[in-house]
């Protein structure tokens, strides 16, 4: 979290005798008088104007780094102890600090805003930047940069009915990171966007809209209804794509697709015909998930299971031909399905029921219908009574048992959820009403044994919310086993890589145990099944499969005569069928289009791990079968986003986080960076604290840019800028000649570039993001920017200043490049503020790898850092005021002293030492007994005179009082632990907590005693 420094809002500066500005510790000299009442945004300042304007800026700008460093951050910010204006020293170069910090492009088209005039990054500018990127054509693939093979990724098409949620934010962020990285690497990059027609969801939305007008879907013809749906789509269907743009998605919108587009519809028909011709599509009556309210079959993905309170009903089934004592008691959660029972099963090793195996049971309330009692190891002896009723027409597991054993299949349910004539007297009753009535009758006849509470796993429609009914229905299916074999082989032989690799086992398991896919839906919105039936003929035996009606009619005439009449199957295809063609249908398949030749197969498919089976595996199977190629080389699976407590986001819990609201408060970059730091394949707990921290990171980056810009030459000084920009530090000679802090930070940058690039290439985005974050915040902002002030403000050496400027610019512009895929908006804004940019950041060249590093300089600076940290810790331990400068004796070998003394100004500035009283020596000073001794590292020590840091007598009194209080608190904790009643009766967590507090208190007491003894010894020595 960035700590706010001193800020003071000033709207008018009007003074007869203004006190001029100067860096801390310098003597002031008068400046001209100024009376400013406003400064226009595009005001072109003269030299004297700019000095006063910078004073104004200092009053209105936040702290760049922290309140501790505000007075030395740059000459325009105030000392914490003095807010007066001071004047410039004779060697101060004001030209270095009075600039129009616009890039040429920014100032000309007013797209970008410089940190030099903006207090912080304005989130409102994100849309303006995005529109500018798109207008420049940067989202389209470019083959002009010679960066190798195209990088192609297909966007998982969100539902056309959808509005942005955090799941969308996750996939957009990760895919945009990939696209932006490979675009900067020079590869022709194509990210294909689009939306899904979402058959059930869209039809429901429009039906609800019509209901408000008093119209039912069935009141309209199919053509009239679909016309209304298309009208709705044209009016509202673009909402989700607009919201995706808001996240910064750099996809090629000129190639945007909709699954019901004409070309994609042709692809769907071609796929159906091709699979049917290969014998992979067939029609039959099988058990499916049926939605009574929607009146359609639904896919497994569209069924959500919820834990709900219910009952377990115990019912007697009498054994035919036996006595009153011969009966089996079954336990079921759905008694109304007993009318569809075709057998009763027990475990073959269950001795309780062994004597009944092979006999017949009488189904209750059916007037004596008999069913066999069979043995099967599938039966769970521990559940209920250990007796299983088999209703294959209404249970998926029972259905498979019946198919295996050859049992008949009965259906007791109508498609609207009412019972049919198989239920006898319960015919026409709603399934849940029939359950109540049946149980009452069972109890009355003595066949109802008991009803007990039981938690049910209820299948509900994802769209309508009603309870799904397993039902036997005539549908179209795809034979999956031969397709699955090819998809399994692709992973086994390495043609397809799944990331993280642990999901390979799940992928293999699902494909190994795959079932045939029901692809027909009883809807009006979607791709009509390309099957035509013959008027007057049996639908199951006589039908035509064709790409369109014209082709179907030609085939029908050839087979049945010229007078034949045909009609199309009323059903539509499962939405997932068209989605399974997405990677190649969006590139022009089945035509041999230019895009298909250039960009297929694609590079990677990124999506949530929860649809690995339903979408990813099906795309692999369809791609292999229809194109002969795996549609992508990699599958990258992300986790789900949960709330801070790890709970799934839901309206019921009230924990849904809206991405658009988040963007308004924290900015798109902060949201993207937060999401991207999650581990691949694992769920991410999203908290406001993380978002706040990364909003602060955005602000930190902005303020660092402000600092860099304020310390660059004037843009008009072309010769100075030529010298700066020529420094690339890409040779060992250019690196080793740098001063120690500069050599260190450049070497660490080069290490970072190698590491981050490797992480990007392996799709380890969380590691790349953390490394960039740590380097920028820890190494660059907290260390090098601070160290550079000794060159920029107190050097007096133009050569040293120029080197620092070059390093600041070099490191900062490379940080912007590395960070751009994560945080595109703020990085582009800052990049555009830097003068003389040859390329816009989005298409700039990625930093080179394997650049030189000076390991010796890195270790030396790390040694110096250890010394500075040790001094800072000692100051903190003795509560030395931040502004107070103290003396020190640095003890080390001559080699170490050589590089430490060469950067004594840096040491003094970052440790708050009085440079005139810092001694460098190979031997300890004579007053070591009255100094705080610190060891920074082996061979590097320092002695800090105690008198400089603290009033010894006052500190002894303070510590004595503190020690007494700590001892009392410790004694109370020990007494509590020694009380038998507390230890025996208190909860284990409470006892453990008290023990931990006692241990911590004991440790603090020991430390305080040691410190007190040390202070007392110094007093004795002084006497």
Image: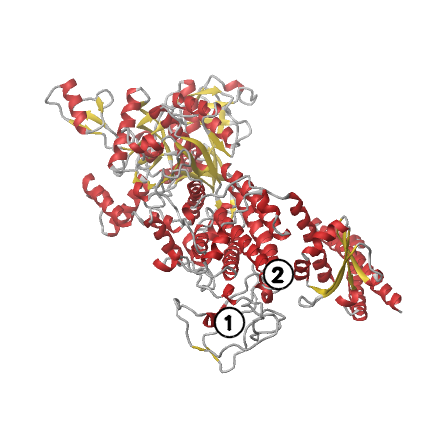
Answer with the quarter of the image where residue 664 lies. bottom left
- SS under mark 1: helix
Where residue 222 appears, as percent x and y from the top left, is 20, 39
Mark 2 residue crowding within 10 angstroms, few (<14) / some (14–19) / many (20+): many
**Label 1 vs label 2: CA separation?**
21 Å
Foreground disc of the pair 1, 2: 2
> Is 684 placed above or below 361 here?
below
Q: Nearer the viewer, residue 375 or 560?
A: 560
Q: Which mark is residue 812?
A: none
Answer with the quarter of the image where residue 561 lies. top left
Q: Along the horizontal axis of the image, is 721 left or right of 578?
A: right
Query: N-terminal of the two: label 1 or label 2?
Result: 1
> Is 42 placed above or below 526 here?
below
Assign the N terminus to one quadrant of the image. bottom right
In this view, the residue farthest toward the front is 719
What residue is rendered at 28% in x and 20% in y? Answer: 277
> Is 276 placed above or below 754 here?
above
Where residue 86 appears, as percent x and y from the top left, is 57, 74
Q: Which residue is mark 1?
A: 55
In this view, the residue farthest toward the left is 563
In this view, the residue farthest toward the top is 358
Q: Which residue is mark 2?
A: 790
Q: Along the horizontal axis of the image, is 589 left or right of 1013?
A: left
Mark 1 residue crowding within 10 angstroms, few (<14) / some (14–19) / many (20+): some
What residue is rendered at 36% in x and 45% in y? Answer: 138
Q: Is residue 68 visible?
A: yes
Where residue 282 appears, as percent x and y from the top left, is 30, 23
- SS under mark 2: helix
């Amino acid at each position: 979290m960035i700590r706010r420094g001193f800020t003071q809002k000033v709207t008018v500066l009007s003074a007869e005798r203004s006190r001029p500005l100067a860096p801390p510790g310098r003597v002031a000299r008068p400046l001209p008088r100024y009376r400013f009442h406003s400064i226009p945004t595009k005001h072109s300042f003269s030299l004297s104007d700019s000095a006063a304007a910078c004073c104004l800026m200092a009053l209105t700008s936040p702290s760049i780094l922290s309140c501790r460093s505000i007075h030395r951050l740059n000459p325009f910010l105030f000392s914490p102890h003095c807010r007066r204006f001071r004047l410039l020293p004779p060697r101060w170069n004001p030209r270095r600090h009075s600039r129009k910090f616009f890039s040429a492009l920014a100032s000309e088209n007013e797209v970008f805003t410089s940190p030099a005039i903006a207090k912080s990054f304005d989130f409102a500018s994100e849309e303006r930047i995005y529109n500018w990127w798109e207008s420049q054509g940067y989202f389209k693939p470019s083959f002009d940069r010679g960066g190798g093979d195209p990088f192609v990724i297909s966007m998982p098409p969100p539902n056309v009915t959808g509005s942005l949620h955090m799941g969308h934010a996750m996939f957009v962020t990760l895919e945009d990171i990939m696209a932006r990285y490979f675009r900067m690497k020079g590869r022709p990059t194509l990210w294909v966007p689009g939306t899904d027609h979402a058959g059930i969801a869209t039809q429901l939305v429009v039906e609800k809209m019509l209901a408000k007008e008093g119209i039912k879907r069935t009141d309209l013809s199919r053509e009239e209804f679909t016309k209304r749906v298309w009208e709705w789509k044209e009016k509202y269907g673009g909402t989700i794509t607009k919201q995706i743009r808001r996240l910064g998605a750099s996809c090629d919108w000129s190639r945007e697709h909709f699954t019901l587009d004409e070309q994609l519809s042709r692809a769907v028909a071609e796929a159906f015909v091709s699979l049917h011709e290969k014998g992979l599509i067939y029609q039959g009556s099988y058990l499916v998930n049926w939605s009574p309210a929607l009146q359609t079959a639904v896919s497994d993905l569209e069924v959500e299971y919820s834990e709900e309170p219910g009952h377990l009903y115990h019912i007697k089934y009498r054994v035919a031909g036996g006595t009153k004592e011969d009966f089996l008691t079954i336990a079921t959660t759905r008694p109304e399905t007993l009318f569809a029972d075709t057998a009763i099963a027990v475990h073959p090793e269950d001795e309780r029921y062994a004597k009944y195996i092979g006999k017949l049971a009488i189904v209750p309330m059916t007037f004596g219908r008999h069913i066999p009692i069979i043995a099967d190891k599938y039966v769970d002896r521990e559940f209920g009574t250990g007796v299983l009723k088999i209703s294959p027409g209404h249970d998926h597991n029972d259905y498979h048992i019946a198919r295996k054993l050859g049992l008949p299949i009965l259906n007791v349910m109508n498609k609207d959820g009412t019972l049919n004539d198989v239920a006898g007297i319960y015919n026409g009753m709603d399934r849940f009403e029939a359950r109540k009535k049946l149980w009452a009758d069972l109890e009355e006849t003595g066949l109802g044994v008991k009803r007990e509470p039981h938690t049910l796993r209820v299948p509900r429609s994802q769209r309508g919310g009603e309870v799904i009914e397993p039902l036997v229905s005539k549908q179209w299916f795809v034979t999956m086993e031969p397709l699955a074999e090819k998809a399994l082989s692709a992973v086994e032989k390495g043609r397809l890589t799944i990331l993280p690799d642990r999901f390979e086992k799940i992928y293999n398991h699902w494909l190994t145990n795959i079932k045939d896919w029901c692809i027909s839906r009883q809807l009006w919105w979607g791709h009509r099944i390309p099957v035509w039936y013959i008027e007057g003929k049996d639908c199951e035996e006589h039908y035509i499969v064709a790409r369109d009606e014209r082709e179907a009619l030609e085939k029908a005439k050839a087979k049945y005569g010229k007078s034949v009449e045909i009609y199309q199957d009323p059903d539509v295809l499962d939405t997932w069928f068209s989605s399974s063609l997405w990677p190649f249908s969006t590139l022009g398949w089945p035509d041999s289009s230019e895009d298909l030749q250039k960009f297929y197969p694609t590079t990677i498919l990124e999506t949530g791990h929860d649809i690995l089976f339903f979408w990813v595996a099906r795309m692999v199977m369809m791609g292999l079968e229809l194109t002969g190629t795996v549609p992508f080389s990699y599958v990258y699976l992300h986790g789900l986003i949960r709330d801070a407590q790890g709970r799934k986001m839901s309206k019921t819990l009230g924990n849904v986080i809206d991405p658009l609201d988040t963007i308004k408060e924290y900015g798109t970059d902060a949201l993207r960076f937060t999401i991207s730091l999650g581990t691949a394949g694992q769920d991410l707990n999203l908290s406001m604290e993380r978002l706040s921290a990364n909003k602060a990171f955005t602000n930190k980056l902005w303020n660092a840019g402000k600092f860099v810009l304020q310390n660059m030459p004037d843009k008009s000084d072309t010769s100075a800028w030529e010298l700066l920009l020529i420094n690339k530090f890409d040779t060992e000679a250019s690196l080793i000649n740098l001063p120690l802090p500069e050599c260190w930070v450049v070497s660490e940058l080069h290490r970072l570039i190698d590491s981050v690039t490797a992480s990007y290439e392996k799709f380890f985005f969380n590691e790349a993001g953390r490394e960039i974050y740590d380097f920028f915040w820890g190494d660059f902002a907290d260390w090098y920017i601070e160290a550079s002030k000794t060159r920029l403000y107190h050097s007096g050496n133009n050569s040293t200043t120029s080197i620092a400027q070059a390093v600041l610019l070099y490191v900062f512009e490379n940080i912007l490049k590395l960070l751009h895929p994560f945080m595109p908006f703020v990085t582009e804004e800052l990049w555009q503020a830097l003068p003389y940019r040859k390329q816009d950041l989005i298409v700039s060249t990625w930093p080179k790898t394997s650049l030189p590093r000076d390991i010796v300089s890195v270790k030396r600076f790390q040694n110096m850092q250890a010394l500075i940290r040790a001094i800072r810790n000692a100051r903190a331990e003795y509560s030395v005021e931040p502004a107070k400068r103290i003396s020190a004796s640095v003890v080390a070998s001559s080699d170490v002293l050589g590089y430490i003394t060469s950067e004594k100004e840096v040491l003094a500035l970052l440790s708050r030492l009085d440079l005139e009283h810092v001694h460098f020596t190979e031997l300890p000073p004579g007053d070591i007994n009255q100094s705080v001794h610190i060891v920074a590292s082996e061979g590097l020590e320092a002695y800090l005179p105690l008198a400089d840091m603290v009033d010894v007598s006052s500190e002894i009194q303070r510590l004595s009082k503190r020690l007494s209080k700590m001892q009392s608190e410790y004694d109370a904790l020990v007494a509590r632990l020694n009380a038998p009643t507390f230890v025996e009766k208190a909860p284990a967590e409470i006892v453990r907590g008290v023990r931990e507090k006692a241990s911590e208190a004991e440790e603090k007491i020991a430390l305080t005693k040691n410190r007190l003894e040390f202070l007392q010894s110094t007093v004795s020595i002084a006497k």
